[in-house]
Image: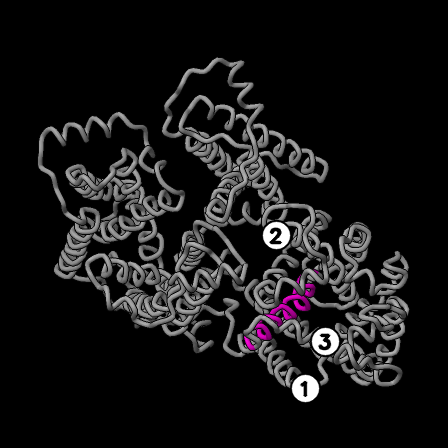
Amino acid sequence: MKTSRTTLIAISLAYLAFVVYGSLVPLRFRPLPFEEAVASFRSIKYLNLGIASRADWVSNILLFVPLAFFTMGVLDGRGKARRIITSAAVMLVLVALSGAIEFTQLFFPPRTVSINDIIAESVGAAAGVVAWWIWGQRVLAWLEGGQRTRGHADIATRILWGYLAILFGYSLLPLDLTISPVEIFHKWRQGRMVLTPFAFLSKLDARGMYEVVSDVAVWVPVSLLLVASGRKDRRSAWIWAVGAASFLELLQVFVWTRVSDVNDVLAAIAGGGIGSWIGGVVFHKGQAVEAAPTERKSKQLSLVWGLGFVIWSAVLVAVFWYPYDFMVDRAFLRERIALLLGRVPFHAYYYGTEYRAITELLHRVAFFAPLGALAAAWIRRGPRSGVVDAVLCLIPCGLVALIVEGGRLFIPSKQPDTIDPVLEIAGALTGFWIARAVVGRQSVYRGSAVKTVSGEVEALPVDTVARRSRSGSSRPVGTGQLTMGQLVLLCGGPLVFWLVGSVAMSLSGVPYNVRKLFGGGHPVLTLFILCLALYWICGVPVWFRVWLARGSWLRVPAWVVLVMIHGAVCYTLLRLSVPVEMIHKIVGSPVLGWPWEWELLGRFLALFAIPSVLMTGALLPVPVGMGSVRNLPWRWFAVAAVLLPLSHWVVVIQADTDNLVELMAGGGTWFSSILLGGWLYVMFQTGTILAARVAGHWRVSLTAALVFVVFSIPLCYALLWAGTENDIYKYEKHFSALQFMLSPDREHYLGGGGLAARYSVVHLLAVGVICAAQLTVMKLLGIFQEKQQRIRPSQLKERA
C-alpha cells in the first residue's frame, strides 16, 4: 500500500492548502492588534440561521470530511490502539485548525467569523474519521488497484462511478435539504416541481436551447461508459441511464432550491440513447479486423478527428462568449486587465454562493474535457510516448483556452478569473487521459481482434474469446449484474405490502390509531411510503448481520453509526408519509428548543435503535453470508449492552410526554422494557426463521417452522400483556393498553377472545412482513455471493 499512501499524502496536502486558501480568499489582509483580535474572537456568537442557510451548514461540514478522511489515511497504522489514538489526534488537530482559520479570518475581511463554522467543521471532521474507519481500507485498495489497472473495461467502470458521484453531488447542491411536507408543498406551488412534459418548448430561446442540450449531454457519458466497461449492452445501458436520471429527480424533490423536472428525465432518455449508440459504434461487438488501416484511411481518420476538434472549439467559443455584448475600448480593456492581474486566483468565485462557484468550476472542466478527448484521437499517430502526446494535446487546447478567456475580457457581463485558463486546460487533460485510458487501450469484445480509436489493431486473449463465446453474451462473464428478475424481486416486496395494505385499509375494523396515519390527504402515497419504510426496517438488519460477521472488531463502533443511519432513513420516510403529530404521539413534542427537528429526530433514533438492534440479534443464528461467526454474538452484545439501556433512558426516563410511557406497565419500568423487548425479539425471530427456511439457509422442516410461528402467537401475546398497562383511565373510561392499540374506535373496546383473535391477525401480518422483507434481502445477498465466487477465479486468471 506504499504507493496509495503516497497518493493520499499528496491529496491531503493539496486539499489542506485548498481549505486554508479558500477560507481566506480574497486575501485582503487588514492589520489588527493581537489583543483586539483575541477579544473579538472570544465574543463570537452562534448565528441563528434559517432554511436559506442550510447550505452553509452542509458546505462547512462537507469541507472537513475529506480532510479528516485523507489525514486518517496518512497517519493510520496497524493496531486498534494506534487507530483510536490517531482518530483522537486527528479530531483535536482539525478542531484546532477550524478555530485557527476562524481566528485568522478576523484579519481578512470581508470573511464572516462565527461559531457555526467551527461546529459544522468539527462535525465534518468527526464524520471523516468515522468514514475512514468504515471505508478507509477499501479506498487504499481501490487506489492501489487503480494504479495497477491496465484493461480499459476496469478503467471505464472506475471513471463511470466517479462521474456519477460528481453528477449526483452537483445535482443535489446546495444541499439545503428538507423533508417537511409543508415546505415540499410550497416548493410545488412556487413552480419548482415541473410535471408537464415538454414545458420548455414555450420558452425555447438561445439560453433555453443551451439548457436542453446540456441536460441531454450530461447523460451521454453514463450509457457510453457502461457500454465501454462491458457490463451492459446498449439497451441495458440506456435503461440504467434513464433509471439513474429518474432517481436523481426524485432526490431533488427534497432539495429546497433545486427544480425537479420531468423534462430532465426526457433529456436523459435522449442522452442515454446517444451514449449507447456511440458506445455501440466505437466499442462494437465487432467482427475481427483483418488488417491495419491503410495510410490513406489513417489520414482520413486524422482529418475527421481534427475537424471534430475545430467544431468543438467553435462550440466552446459560442458558449463562453454568450451574449456577445463586446465592448471594444482600449481604456476598458486596460482596466479589465489591470483588475484581473490584481486579483488572486478564485477571487471571482468568492463573490456568490457555493453553488455558483462549483457550477462555474465544473462548467470549465466539463466543457473542455471533450476537447482533450478529440485531441487524443487526433494526435495519436506513431509510436510516441504518453508524455509526448500529452504535451502535443496541451498546445492546441491551451490555445483554445486563451482564445476563450481573451474574448471574455471584452464582455462587461463576464467576470474572468486568473484560474479559469488553468481549469480549462485541466479539463482538457482530463478528457485526454480518459480517452487514452478507455479507448486507446486493448478492448474486451468478441472476436480475435478489435480496432482502437487510434486505428491500431489489438488481439484478444484466446481464453477471453472462448469464455465469451460459450456464454453467448457480449458482456463479460461474471460481472455481477442485476437481472430483470432480480430487480422485480427487489421491488416486488413493497408493492405486495402496498396491495395488502390497500385491502386492509378498506376494512371497517382497522384500529382508529392506524387510520390517523392516513390523515394527511394522500392516503395512497402515504401507504406506499409506509410500505417502503417497513421494507427498509426489516430488510437492512440482514445486511447488518452479514456485515458484522466479516472484518474485525472495528466494525462494532461503525455499526452504531449504521444503526443511526438506518433510523434516520426511516424517520425521513415517516415524515414524508404521516402527519408530524403522529410522531409526536410516540416520541413526544419538542421541549428543549433545539433548531429544526433535531430533538424529534434524536428521540426517534433512540426509540428506533431498539427494534434495529433486536432484529439484528434475531438474525445471529441464521447462517447467511460469508465470514466468521465465532465472535458475532459478542460483537452484537457489545452494542446492545450500550444502546438498549441508553434507549430506555431517552425514551422512557427522559420522556417529556406520557403518550408512550402510560401504555407501559408501571409507568415505564426497566422490567416492562425487558418484557416488551422480549416480545419484539420473539416476533422478529419468528419472521427470521420462516424467511431463512424458505431461503434455504435454515436446515429445519417447513412444518417445524410453521409450528414455531403458531406457538409464537400466545408467547408474544403473554409478553405484550405483561409488559403493558392493564388499567388506564382516560377519556372517562377504563381500558388496557392492548385495547387502546387494537380496538376499532374509542367507543367499542374489544376484550377477551376478540382481543386475542385480533392480536393473532396483527401478529401474523407482522411476521409475514418480516419474512417477506428479509427473504428478499437474503436472496439478493445469496445471488451477489454466487457472482462473487464466480468472478474470483476468472479475475485471478486474468491478473496472472
Outermost residue to the front: 732
The image position of residue 95, as x and y in percent, is 59, 31
Main secondary structure type of the part rendered in magenta: helix
Determine if residue 449 is in view. no
Label for residue 209? none
Label 3: element kind: helix
Crowd around label 3: few <14 · some 14–19 · many ≥20 (10 Å): many
Q: Which of marks 3 and 1 is nearer the N terminus?
A: 1
Q: Earlier in the sequence, mark 2 or mark 1?
A: 1
Q: Which of marks 3 and 2 is nearer the N terminus?
A: 2
Query: Which residue is at the front of the view, 606 or 188?
Result: 188
The image position of residue 687, as x and y in percent, is 75, 74
Label 2: element kind: loop
The image position of residue 660, as x and y in percent, is 78, 62
Q: What range is drawn magenta here?
A: 524-544
Mark 2: amino acid: Glu
Mark 3: amino acid: Ala
* Residue where numbered disc 1 is placed: 507
Whether residue 386 is situated above or below residue 758 in the rendered picture:
above
Residue 632 lies in the magenta stretch: no
Residue 776 is left or right of residue 186, and the answer is right
Mark 1: amino acid: Leu
The image position of residue 5, as x and y in percent, is 53, 38
Crowd around label 2: few <14 · some 14–19 · many ≥20 (10 Å): few
* Residue where numbered disc 3 is placed: 691
Res 172 → quadrant: bottom left
Label for residue 597? 2
Residue 530 lies in the magenta stretch: yes
Label 1: element kind: loop
Q: How far apart are marks 3 and 1 (CA)?
A: 28 Å
Determine if residue 115 is in view. yes
